[in-house]
Image (tube, rainbow, N blue to C red):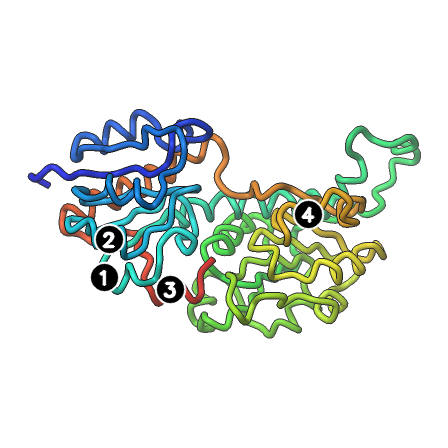
Amino acid sequence: MSDRKRVLITQEKGGFYGDIFQDDIMADLKAVAEVVENDLGRRFTTEELIERARDCDAIITSWGSPRIDMSVVSAAPKLKIIAHAAGSVKPFVAEEVWDAGITVTNAASVMGVYVGEFALLVTLALLRSLPKYTPGAPEGAWDGLRCDGWETLVGKRVGLIGLGHTARSFVRFLAPFECELVGFDPYMSPEKASEIGVLLVSLEELLSTSKVVSLHAPITEETKGMLGAREFAMMQDGAVFVNTARGILVDHEALYNELKTGRIKAALDVTFPEPLPPDHPLRTLPNVILTPHVAGPTVDGRRDMFRCVVDDLKLFWSGKTPKNIVTKQMLATMA
């Protein structure tokens, strides 16, 4: 890394910029590269991005970055790598960029840890029926000290739909609970699933036999609306459904119709549309936890995304392979 590189950070300052691009990691990056930051106080337009990327060796993107397409790449002859300090790169990098030989990395492995932690959090909360005690335990909650609707996670069967970064993190968090883990993922071999402790089964078997069903699938033409009335009807009484993937994978009317019977419970960090309308009936149910797409990095964990991309940039510039490369082939099966 004898030659000093030039890096453009597209994220505008303000908001959560300081949470991600923290000073100690920035100093590490500046030790090997000249850093050009977005000084406009707003998102770059494509034209502004093109102008600032002309002499750059790398671009660091994150949430809210403008989309990088061939108009940007063609104007930046030194550009060799785009490092995304967040999860999905699909909205931010056009497929043609891979064809131009640009290396792309992301921080999905970091985000997956926090999403897995969140999935565990809401799973436990729903098994113990915590929503019915908030805000403030209702009158009569202490009468008889009943455990109505309280169940343990220990030893339960947990079904994972999709076995990417977030599902694998959830698997690691489930280890102390000695759960039986089954999965549905048409893109993973039984041998690979077995390596992470998951038995591959059909979607029908997963839905009908799992106490917890956790959705981690990407958006593809096959997965849009993959869970509807038929699928939710298969779930056993008292089962918990968790969606930290994408709302468009779920038929929300069908889910509401099943939830309003009280037969199952659900935690929805993502919906379609997002957010749901203020008068949407899913907002009214006592057996639903509804959160505003916050399962990913926490305030203190956002810095890890920057650490991830800086480490990969340093590997790339030293002639080594970055740990978090996203290939064009991966786009079809990732979030």
Marks 3 and 4, the one that precedes in the sequence:
4
Marks 3 and 2, the one that precedes in the sequence:
2
What amino acid is found at the position of numbered circle 3 in the picture?
A: Met
Label disc, if present, on residue 73 of the rendered structure: 2
What amino acid is found at the position of numbered circle 1 in the picture?
A: Ala
Which residue position is annotated with label 4?
A: 276
- Marks 2 and 1, Cα distance to the nearest angstrom? 8 Å
Q: Secondary structure at mark 1?
A: loop
Q: Quadrant of residue 122?
A: top right
Residue 196, position as x, y percentages in the image: 46, 61
Q: Secondary structure at mark 3?
A: helix
What amino acid is found at the position of numbered circle 2 in the picture?
A: Val
- Marks 3 and 2, Cα distance to the nearest angstrom? 21 Å
Q: Secondary structure at mark 4?
A: loop
Q: Give the class, few, some or many, for how many residues have Cα within 10 Å of label 1's Cα (few <14, many ≥20).
A: few
What amino acid is found at the position of numbered circle 4 in the picture?
A: Leu
Label disc, if present, on residue 330 of the rendered structure: 3
User: Which mark is in front, 2 or 4?
Assistant: 2
Task: Report whether 189 appears left or right of 126.
Answer: left
Label disc, if present, on residue 334 of the rendered structure: none
- Marks 1 and 4, Cα distance to the nearest angstrom? 39 Å
Tell me whether circle 2 and circle 1 mark residues in contact (CB < 8 Å).
yes
